[in-house]
Amino acid sequence: MPKLRCTVDNCSYNKEQYCTLNAINVDGNGEGATNVEDTCCASFDATEYTLSNKEHVVQAVVDVKCTADNCIFNHHTVCNAEEIGIAGASTCTCSHDTQCGTFRCGRD
Ligand code: SF4
């Protein structure tokens, strides 16, 4: 399971740029993703953003299911990267405003 850092500050599960979920889903649209911008964190959720969410416990490593088949770190929909970075501005309003910055296309 990868270590995860995340810059999406307004996600309900973000605490000090770490994730408090023990599992997330990254969407890469099957073989559709060929660059970072084609991926997103499907677990992003801004709707329950409250101060109390900041009491959640940071997870050092996170189980990452991912549909980006072209990524070199994807092994049968499981991310095998040592560390990943989810990126997005604090103005994100939906999951498609986020991306997996570690995506690396292995397609020729
Ligand atoms: S590094 Fe690749 S396999 Fe891992 S979550 Fe990001 S896009 Fe998916």
Image (tube, helix red, strand yellow):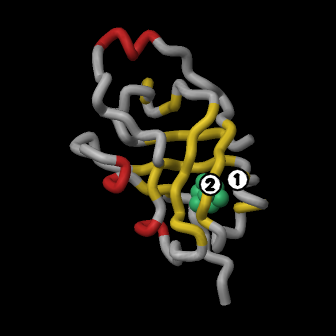
Secondary element at tag 1: strand
Q: Residue 20 versus residue 68: which sits nearer the camera?
A: 68
Q: Is residue 97 left or right of residue 101?
A: left
Query: Which amino acid type corresponds to the residue marked 2 in the rendered image?
Result: Cys
Say which quarter of the image contains residue 74: bottom right
Q: Residue 81 versus residue 53: which sits nearer the camera?
A: 53
How many numbered circles does the render carry? 2
Image height of 32 relative to 98, above or below: below
- From the viewer's perspective, is the residue at label 2 or at label 1 nearer? 2
Image height of 78 relative to 70, above or below: above
Looking at the rendered image, the quarter that the C terminus falls into is bottom right
Q: Residue at x 54, y 51 (%)?
A: 26
Secondary element at tag 2: strand
- The 10 Å Cα crowd at callout 2, few under 14, some 14 to 19, many 20 or more, is many
Q: Residue at x 72, y 52 (%)?
A: 78
Is label 2's Cβ within 8 Å of ligand 1?
yes
Of the two numbered discs 2 and 1 on the same chain, state the one appearing first in sequence: 2
Say which quarter of the image contains residue 57: top right
- Circles 2, 1 touching at the beta carbon (< 8 Å): yes
Which quarter of the rendered image does ligand 1 occupy? Answer: bottom right
Is label 1's Cβ within 8 Å of ligand 1?
yes
- The 10 Å Cα crowd at callout 1, few under 14, some 14 to 19, many 20 or more, is many
Q: Residue furthest front?
A: 30
Q: Which residue is mark 2?
A: 66
Q: Residue at x 77, y 60 (%)?
A: 76
Query: Which amino acid type corresponds to the residue marked 1 in the rendered image?
Result: Cys
Q: Which residue is mark 1?
A: 79
Question: Where does residue 17 sit, x and y in percent of width and height?
Answer: 45, 33
Question: Where does residue 16 sit, x and y in percent of width and height?
Answer: 43, 26
Q: Residue furthest left?
A: 91
Say which quarter of the image contains residue 90: top left
